[in-house]
Each structure stands twice: as structure tokens, then as C-alpha cells.
Image (cartoon, grey):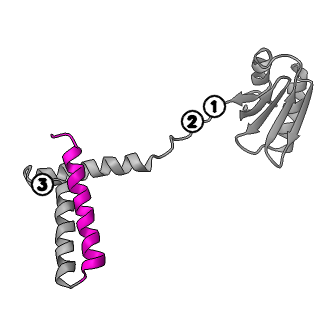
Amino acid sequence: MAEGAHAPLKARIVHQTEGRTRLALAAPATHERLVALADALAACGVEKVEIRTVTGSVILTHDTPWPAIAGAVAAAGLELFTPPPPPPPKDPIGETGDRLSQADLLVTLFSRGQLDVRNAAFLALVVGGLVQLARGRVAGPALTLFGQALTLAVLGKNRPQR
């Protein structure tokens, strides 16, 4: 690199309207480096350069369309980059369904096809209801557990066979 030459500053476009572009610097730069950048940008056709050191922003005011000055901006010492896209939002319901499907497969494999998660849940609810009946708790816990077991039984009739 020649004496006085600087490595390009990395920046991304944060906001852009006709005649105005706001860039965010990827890393802090010295005051001298930012002044040199502003001078180089002014020399390549940018009308006004505002540097905001607190936010790490460079605001360019230009009368020509962005595509026409983008090359000159790069030549002045700004390397534009595009940040990676944000990760897709998590789908907790779909993720739970996937995990239940995996658990169902494991239960089916270990029971050699005799049991699946739905049937295991049904059996657990019936056993829990019987335990509550044996303790004399008929009205609340036993009937609730039997009701949930019945719901699983009805839903089991409506699902497609494997």
C-alpha cells in the first residue's frame, strides 16, 4: 500500500432516498481517517458529507443517482458490504410437532410397532384417572383425566392410518 493510502473502510447502506444515503461504518475509524474519507468523497462528486462519529454513520448528499456514484464511493475508500440476512423466525408449534414426531418414531421403534405416543398418553391418562378414583377423587381429577383420554381416543379415530 502506498504511503498515505488507507485500507478501505467497510460500511453498509442503512437508509437511502433519492439524493441521500446513510451508511453505517462496520468499525470505528480515527478522526483523521474520517476527514480524509470526507475529502475523497467530496472530490468524487458527493455534494455534502456528514460524519457522525457517535453513531458511526456517514451521510452522503448527492445529486446523481446512487448507481452512478457507487463506483466513485468505492474508489474514495468505502467498501460496501451486505450484512447476512437475519435467521428465519422460529416456529414453536412446528418445532414441537417435529419433536413429537421424533418421539413417536422412537416409541414405535422401541415397542416394535405396538405403541405410539398418542396411545402411550391415552394409557397414562387412564391409569392416572384410575389412581384418582382409587383415592376417592372422582369429581375433579379423575373425570378430567378420563375426559382428556376420551379426547385422545376420539382424535385417534380421525387420524389417518399408518
Q: CA distance from mark 3 to mark 1?
A: 51 Å
Say which residue label 2 marks.
85
**Under tag 1, what secondary structure?**
loop
Is residue 96 visible to the viewer in this orientation of the structure? yes
Comparing 155 with 20, the one in front is 155
Residue 22: x %, y % from top left: 80, 34
Is residue 117 depicted above or below 1 in this figure?
below
Q: Residue at x 85, y 16 (%)?
A: 64
Instruction: Give the magenta part as a residue range.
Output: 137-162
- Marks 2 and 3, how far apart in space? 43 Å
Tag 3 and tag 1, C-beta contact below 8 Å: no
Residue 95 percent location from the top left of the image? 38, 48
| Secondary structure category for the residue under label 3 | loop
> Hey, which quadrant is residue 110 in on the image?
bottom left
Q: Residue 52: which quarter of the image?
A: top right
Q: Which residue is mark 1?
A: 82
- Main SS, magenta region, reads helix
Name the residue rendered at 89%, 36% in the picture.
50
List x then y, in percent, for residue 86: 56, 40
What type is the residue that disc 1 sits on?
A: Thr
Of marks 3 and 1, which one's residue comes earlier in the chain?
1
Mark seen at residue 115: 3
Residue under the point 26% across and 69% down: 145
* Left or right of 89 in this view: 108: left
Q: Nearer the viewer, mark 2 or mark 1?
A: 2
Q: Nearer the viewer, residue 144 or 40?
A: 144
Label 2, label 1: how far apart the Cα atoms are: 9 Å
Is residue 6 shown to the viewer in this render?
no
Decide if residue 96 is on the left or right side of residue 55.
Answer: left
Amino acid type, residue under disc 3 in the picture: Leu
Residue furthest to the bottom in view is: 135
